[in-house]
Amino acid sequence: MTPLAKLLEAALFASARPIPTEELAALDPEASKAALAAALDELGEHYDVDGHGVELVELGGGWQILTRSEYTEAIERAQLAARPARLSAAALETLALIAYRQPLGRAEIEEIRGVSVGSVLKSLHERGLIDVVGRGEGMGRPLLYGTTPIFLEYFALRHLDELPRADELAVALRAEPRAI
């Protein structure tokens, strides 16, 4: 492995969050974008070809070394990994609305869901999954919410374009016919 690939590996190993390419570039200011991309490819290939239990993954706007999915269940069973706290159904509904329709205000969310969402928005904001991204044009200039890079990391997405399309969701949620 090249020295740059080793440097990237050390930084990614030490980090608990995905590191954006711009931050990785700061590790070696003399390295070109092409050299950085080549070193990331080399590192990813190293993990793939040599059969490591970890892989290099691009998610949440950055790069991270993660356990391969085939080992996740065994590690969780042995309680070696910290599991993120689960989201309630109300939080997931609210988060889905924000993800698909952002920027979105509290009143719009409450109108769609039919219930008050103040505490849910507070919880999602405290977890870093949503943030205030602007103010609306309506009366009182309401706060508008959008998702954060932590949201992308939580759901293992590189960008919002990877969210399932509405037509894909309809197919996935359709109940399978029962055999009689």
Image: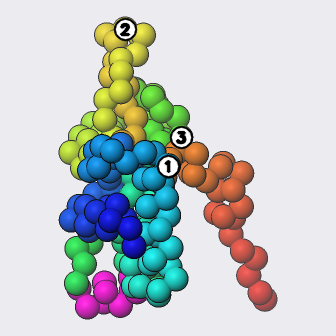
As measured in the structure, the alpha-carbon distance from the residue carrying label 3 to the one carrying label 2 is 24 Å
Residue 27: percent from left, percent from top: 26, 50
Element type at mark 2? loop
Residue 56: percent from left, percent from top: 42, 68
Q: Which residue is mark 1?
A: 34
Q: Quadrant of residue 143?
A: top left
Element type at mark 1? helix
Residue that appears at 39% across and 40% down = 147
Residue that appears at 50% across and 49% down = 34
Residue that appears at 66% across and 64% down = 172
Magenta stretch?
A: 71-79
Residue that appears at 77% across and 87% down = 179
Q: Which mark is residue 100?
A: 3
Residue 73 on the magenta span: yes
Residue 100 visible here: yes
**Among the two numbered marks 3 and 2 on one chain, the one whose residue lies closer to the N terminus:** 3
As measured in the structure, the alpha-carbon distance from the residue carrying label 1 to the one carrying label 2 is 49 Å
Relative to the observer, which residue lies in front, 126 or 68?
Answer: 68
Q: Which mark is residue 139?
A: 2
**Among the two numbered marks 1 and 2 on one chain, the one whose residue lies closer to the N terminus:** 1
Residue 100: percent from left, percent from top: 53, 40
Residue 156 visible here: no
Element type at mark 3? helix
